[in-house]
Image: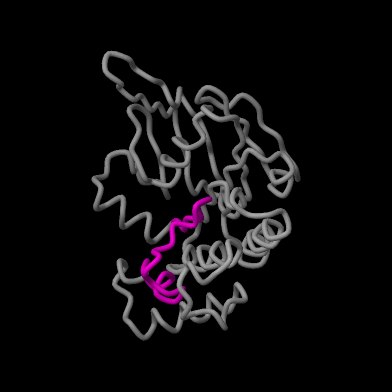
Amino acid sequence: MKRSVIRLENVWKVYKMGDTHVNALQGLHLDIKEGEFLAIMGPSGSGKSTAVNMIGCLDVPTKGRIMLDQHDISRLDESELAQIRGRKIGFIFQQFNLIPTLTALENVTLPMIFQGTGEGERISRAKKLLGLVELGERIYHKPTELSGGQQQRVAIARSLANDPEVILADEPTGNLDSKTGSIVIDFLKRLHKADGKTIIMVTHDAALSRVAERVEFLKDGKIVKSLNNK
């Protein structure tokens, strides 16, 4: 039986807005297995973004536990969370989140700096990753000199910088045309099949979710339906 990589146990996230309490997550249970391709779907306001923050160790819950490799990350401080994120999880965002003043190569090397990787190894690995996403000829270009699809491929290369076990993709094709979006999804499928990465993709696109092995539907901060695509 495959081990759990990330497990959310009765996770609540409550935001205080003046005298009002907003329950973004309400007792969320989610068990993500090693090597799985999981899609999380839900309408706007369903709690998807908050769930991403919890799964990606970007925030801690108000109540409940988040287990990452059997460690309860809900008890860690920000510096400890940052170290775990850097080692275990690679992020791909809808907005790309590239630093505009840095080249593609520099954007990809950045996560490795925070993990203490030596300069020679950083540059060698970043070049290899940019070659993997077919941008070997554009490594010295800045984001404004790249198309949206190329920027998202730089973001994919960056997400792989520290060879994370988990790739967390938040609406990865949201700002791309359908043809370019298909290329990005093909990369995610390749990372899953060929490299055995655990892929967690958050999307509102039903067609996109069909590439996943399992789909969890979120509404009002809770899982309301599960679908197995295997």
Residue at 60 percent of width and 31 percent of height? 42
Quadrant in which residue 86 is drawn: bottom left
Residue 197 place in picture, x, y as percent: 57, 60
Task: Specify start and end residues of the magenta stretch as a single range.
Answer: 89-111
Q: Going by the picture, which residue comes out furthest to the front?
A: 144
Q: Nearer the viewer, residue 34 or 214?
A: 214
Residue at 63 percent of width and 38 percent of height? 204
Q: Quadrant of the C terminus?
A: top right
Residue 55 place in picture, x, y as percent: 45, 43
Asked if residue 73 lies left or right of residue 133, the reply is: left
Quadrant in which residue 19 is drawn: top left
Residue 74 place in picture, x, y as percent: 32, 39
In the rendered image of this protein, does residue 198 appear above or below residue 215?
below
In the rendered image of this protein, does residue 193 appear above or below residue 76?
below
Residue at 57 percent of width and 83 percent of height? 137
In the rendered image of this protein, does residue 90 appear above or below residue 133?
above
Give the colour scheme of this rendering: one colour
Q: Nearer the viewer, residue 148 or 167?
A: 148
Number of on-image labels: 0
In the rendered image of this protein, does residue 205 appear above or below residue 108?
above
Q: Nearer the viewer, residue 103 or 25?
A: 103
Q: Going by the picture, which residue comes out furthest to the top?
A: 19
In the rendered image, residue 138 lying in the magenta stretch gets the answer: no
Residue 173 place in picture, x, y as percent: 62, 52
Asked if residue 10 lies left or right of residue 36, the reply is: left
In the rendered image, residue 95 lying in the magenta stretch gets the answer: yes
